[in-house]
Image: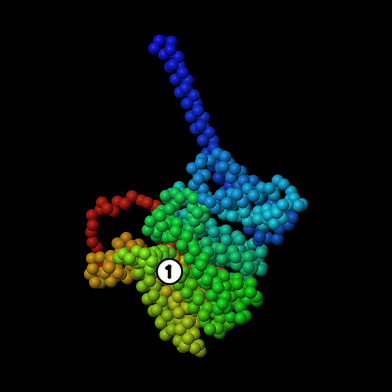
């Protein structure tokens, strides 16, 4: 090759590489610009989502003037444009892989937002082709519903993005509960939520009790809160019962289709799914189980409501739905006059007490156990169907956790019912028929475990009965359930460890397996922390309420800290400082003291493995 040809070729190669570098640099700058704009849109969408929900809540809770409606309309129209701009930007500039990973319902929601735009830019036609479609598209109810749904979805995405940054799960859960507690307290202060003005401390107390599914209240629900206020309480109970992370994770994963490994690991730990593949089916099963049980419970409550409860079909349906929700979530709120001690209920056939007991039991059994029941049912169905698997069942078809929960729960239920029947036979149960005494014994054995409903006045119980009730309140229901207390799993682990020590066993046997040392250590820590915390709260209330009966204050602390909701009747008489103290007790009882402490401590370097082992004297 001649020198001139070689020089020309080198020049062309250099120019080709310069063009490639320029194109790469331009593409990189374009990608950075798109990413920055996407982040700006993400922040704007999140802010406008929160603003839209606040505006809709204020418009529902206040008697708005014309100026208020104009301002809210301007705000909602601005949110509508931001949402639509975010959707269009995503369609134009996001990668194909991102768009393909978007869930079907997310596409539907985005499409509905786009369908709201014609009403913004074009006046309503006088003679539309499809009058029904035009009426829907130009309706404010359609616009508000779409904006509310899109806002909730985007807020869920925002929460999951925060979780995806490996935020401490315990602190994340505690923060989410605090957010809904304060948001609920402000919502209950809205004029349309109450029949008259209430103090903020009382609103905060009821909101804390609802989110922490406790049931303690300083106000009478039927005479204080309107149906809108009742709806707010019901939403807080449902969110607090199933957990904020469960709702946000479900919506974020189900609607977006994006499933980060860290988010899935958090969800798997929450519902104790055995595999990542079974995570979404298990989550759907839990949510569907909740909705089906609450729906069936509402129907049964409606059928067992005696005449005279509720002034019409609508009010009776509202009472039934709220009572079913409150029972399954172990919340203990009752919208009936005089609660479960209403004379009309006490004079009925008692079926409503059995229905309530069944709902309380279902809510307190624990989500991991429900998933295990589903797996066992799936095994049995596959064996029964034609051509199904006839191979041997797994050796441990029921988890050790499920067996311990069922054995401990049934033992506590039987012991509590018998104790209540014997102790209160000639006291609060006097004058009832034998059937009613049995029904009330069953009801009062289950509800102290976390629900907090009271059919007979607890202030009239014998002291021995109060000890039994407080013991049941302290124990509570199963772990990862809607119940409170230290949990029956913890009690079982402590008792099995005690039996092992007394018997001289090297392990801690239970149902053919050995309990892990880590489980026993955590159970012991939970018991110690619960006793210390109860002592501190009792001491503080004794100082703040020197004129109150000591028995009532101790009972109040047990009820608040272990999220039960039963009271001896002194809650409305407490001072504002005492109510705030009980709010912190309900919060700690719902979040879990040990979980909160572990969240604050973080993952520290374990140096104990390098220390030599030594013994101390334990008598």
- At 33% from the left and 68% from the top, the residue drawn is 494
Is residue 90 positioned above or below 142 on the image? Answer: above
Residue density around tag 1, few if under 14, some if 14–19, many if 20 or more, within 10 Å: many
**Quadrant of the rendered structure where residue 69 is?**
bottom right
In the picture, measured across the screen, residue 117 lies left or right of residue 236, that is right
Answer yes or no: is residue 546 visible: no
Residue found at the far right of this picture: 126
User: Which residue lies under the disc numbered 1?
Assistant: 365
State which quarter of the image contains the C terminus.
bottom left
In the rendered image of this protein, does residue 30 appear above or below residue 104?
A: above
**In front of the other: 511 or 475:** 511
Residue at the far front: name it: 387
Residue 608 on image: x %, y %: 28, 53
- Where is residue 185? Give x, y as percent: 58, 61
Determine the image quadrant of residue 217. bottom right
Number of numbered discs overlaid on the protein picture: 1
* Residue occupying image coordinates x 61% and y 66%: 229
Quick one: 235 or 585, which is closer to the camera? 235
Q: Is residue 99 visible?
A: yes
Quarter of the image containing the N terminus?
Answer: top left
Residue 110 rendering spot, x and y as whole percentages? 59, 49
Q: Secondary structure at mark 1?
A: loop
| Camera-side residue of 582 and 129 | 129
What residue is shown at x 55% (from left), y 39% (from top)? 93
Q: Residue at x 55, y 75 (%)?
A: 301
Question: Quarter-wise, where is residue 525 in the image?
Answer: bottom left
Q: Nearer the viewer, residue 78 or 563?
A: 78
Quick check: 69 left or right of 349? right
Q: Where does residue 349 sit, x and y in percent of width and height?
A: 53, 84
């Amino acid at each position: 090759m001649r020198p001139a040809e070689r020089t020309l070729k080198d020049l062309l190669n250099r120019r080709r590489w310069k063009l490639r570098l320029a194109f790469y640099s331009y593409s990189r700058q374009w990608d950075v610009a798109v990413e920055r704009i996407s982040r700006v849109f993400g922040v704007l969408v999140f802010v406008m989502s929160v603003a839209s929900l606040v505006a809709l809540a204020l418009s529902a809770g206040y008697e708005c003037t014309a100026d208020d409606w104009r301002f809210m309309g301007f705000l909602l129209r601005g949110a509508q444009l931001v949402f639509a701009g975010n959707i269009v930007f995503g369609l134009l500039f996001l990668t194909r892989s991102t768009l393909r990973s978007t869930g079907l319902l997310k596409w539907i929601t985005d499409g509905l937002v786009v369908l709201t735009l014609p009403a913004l830019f074009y006046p309503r036609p006088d003679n539309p082709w499809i009058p029904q479609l035009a009426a829907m598209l130009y309706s404010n109810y359609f616009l508000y519903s779409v904006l509310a749904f899109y806002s909730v979805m985007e807020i869920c995405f925002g929460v999951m993005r925060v979780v995806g940054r490996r935020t401490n799960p315990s602190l994340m859960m505690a923060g989410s509960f605090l957010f809904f507690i304060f948001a609920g307290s402000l919502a209950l202060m809205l004029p349309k939520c109450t029949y008259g003005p209430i103090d903020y401390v009382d609103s905060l107390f009821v909101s804390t009790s609802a989110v922490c599914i406790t049931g303690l209240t300083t106000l009478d629900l039927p005479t204080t809160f309107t149906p809108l206020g009742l709806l707010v309480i019901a939403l807080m109970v449902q969110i607090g019962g199933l957990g904020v992370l469960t709702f946000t994770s479900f919506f974020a994963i189900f609607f977006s289709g994006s499933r980060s490994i860290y988010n899935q690991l958090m969800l798997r730990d929450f519902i104790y799914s055995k595999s990542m593949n079974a995570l979404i089916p298990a989550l759907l099963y839990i949510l569907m189980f909740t909705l089906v049980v609450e729906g069936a419970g509402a129907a049964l409550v409606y059928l067992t409501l005696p005449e005279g409860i509720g002034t019409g079909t609508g009010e009776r349906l509202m009472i039934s739905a709220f009572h079913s929700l409150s029972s399954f979530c172990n919340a203990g709120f009752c919208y009936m006059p005089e609660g479960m001690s209403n004379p009309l209920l006490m004079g009925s056939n008692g079926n409503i007490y059995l229905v309530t007991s069944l709902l309380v039991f279902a809510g307190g059994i624990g989500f991991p156990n429900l998933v295990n029941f589903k797996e066992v049912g799936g095994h049995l169905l596959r064996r029964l169907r034609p051509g199904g698997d006839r191979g041997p069942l797994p050796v441990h078809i029921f988890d050790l956790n499920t067996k311990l929960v069922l054995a401990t729960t049934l033992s506590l239920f039987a012991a509590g019912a018998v104790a209540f029947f014997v102790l209160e036979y000639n006291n609060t149960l006097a004058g009832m028929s034998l059937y009613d005494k049995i029904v009330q014994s069953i009801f009062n054995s289950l509800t102290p475990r976390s629900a907090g409903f009271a059919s007979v006045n607890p202030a009239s119980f014998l002291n021995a009965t109060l000890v039994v009730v407080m013991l049941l309140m302290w124990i509570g229901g199963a772990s990862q359930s809607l119940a409170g207390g230290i949990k029956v799993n913890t009690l079982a682990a402590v008792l099995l460890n005690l039996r092992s020590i007394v018997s001289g066993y090297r392990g801690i046997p239970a149902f053919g397996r050995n309990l892990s040392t880590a489980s026993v250590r955590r159970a012991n820590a939970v018991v110690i922390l619960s006793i210390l915390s109860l002592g501190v709260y009792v001491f503080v209330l004794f100082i703040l309420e020197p004129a109150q009966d000591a028995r009532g204050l101790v009972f109040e602390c047990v009820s608040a800290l272990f999220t039960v909701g039963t009271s001896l009747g002194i809650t409305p008489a407490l001072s504002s400082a005492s109510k705030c103290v009980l709010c912190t007790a309900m919060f700690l009882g719902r979040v879990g003291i040990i979980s909160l402490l572990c969240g604050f401590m973080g993952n520290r370097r374990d140096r104990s493995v390098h220390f030599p082992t030594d013994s101390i004297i334990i008598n």
